[in-house]
Amino acid sequence: MTTRLKQSETRNIKRSEINLNPVNPKRHTEDAVKLQKKNLQKVGFLGGIVWNERTGNLIDGHRRVKAMDLYYKYDGTPETDYTLKVEAVNLDEKQEKEQLTYMAEGNTKADIDLIARYAPDIDLSDVGLGADDLAAIGSLVGTADLDIPDIGTELFGQDGSGDEGEEPKATETPNTQEQKIQHVKDMKRQTEEKAEQQAMDEAAYCTLSFSNYDNYLAFVELVGAMEGDRFIKGERVLEMIE
């Protein structure tokens, strides 16, 4: 007889009971969180957040929680607290870190060829695909048949321009299959360069620790933050030093 698998328990809990995991290996950009918020507003919250009741830490669903924080304007106070559905598990710290890693590394790459088959039936602008994937789908289907954002806008900003002072970069529609392949390669390279810069920006953080809670409170007051804040912009400290 097959042994029944353990299952999580679906619960409704308060946001204040949830800690964003300090060692979450997934790094979500502000743009990614805003896109998630837009998706939540479009279809609502579809669940799937995994929460460890033993530690109060999230194991999966950080981007969705951050997006809901934006939507509900959550700032850690009782006035902005809200209720959400989670999948509750009970894991020790070792198991928690193992599952954090598994869920971060277990994300699969989308099958672009398969998406291209139904791409004409959906809006591709808000589903999280990068510029290289959009370019690849466009080369397979033809951009005229797609509800798809302009690739130049995706890479260089809303007006299609690059850095401030640069002229907008003209885009040419590839005609031959060879040109299409090269176009996709160029888009992928530029997207990878942009992703590399974003990764560097996301790594710009450090952790401060204090020998006691009084020292922590003194620091919070010094930089003008609120008691309970666990994430404080380093620029506040820099301004004080300068």
Image (tube, rainbow, N blue to C red):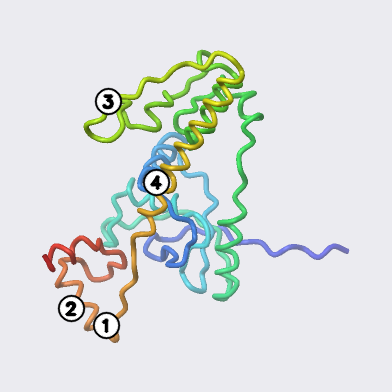
Relative depth, front residue between 5 and 220: 220
Q: Earlier in the sequence, mark 3 or mark 2?
A: 3
Quarter of the image where one finds residue 205: bottom left
Which residue lies under the disc numbered 1?
Answer: 213
Query: As shown in the figure, which amino acid type bears the numbered disc 3?
Result: Glu
Q: Residues within 10 Å of mark 1 (few under 14, many from 20)?
A: few
| Numbered circle sitting on residue 77 | none
Give the SS element for disc 2: helix
Q: Say if 58 sits above or below 198 in the image.
A: below
Give the alpha-carbon distance from disc 1 to disc 4, as whole Å: 31 Å
Instruction: Indicate which disc, 1 or 4, sits on the residue closer to the N terminus.
Output: 4
**How crowded is the residue under tag 2: few (<14 C-alpha within 10 Å), some, or many (20+)?**
few
The C terminus - image quarter: bottom left
Measured from the top left, where is residue 113 in percent x and y? 65, 29
Amino acid on which disc 4 is placed:
Val
| Labels 3, 2: front one | 3
Sooner in the amino-acid sequence: mark 2 or mark 4: 4
In the rendered image, the quadrant that contains the N terminus is bottom right
Q: Indicate whether 81 appears above or below 116.
A: below
Amino acid type at mark 1: Tyr
Q: Is residue 134 above or below residue 96?
A: above
* Up-down relation of residue 163 to residue 201 (above or below): above
**Residue sitting at 60 percent across and 71 percent down?**
95
Q: CA distance from mark 3 to mark 2?
A: 49 Å
Q: Kindly identify which residue carries mark 4.
A: 33
**Which residue is pictured at 40% across the width and 31% down the height?**
154
Residues tagged 1 and 2 counted as in contact (Cβ below 8 A): no
> Callout 3: 10 Å neighbours few (<14), some, many (20+)?
few
Q: Which residue is mark 3?
A: 167
- The disc at residue 218 is 2
Upstream in sequence: badge 1 or badge 2: 1
Find the distance from the CA under tag 2 to the CA under tag 4: 31 Å
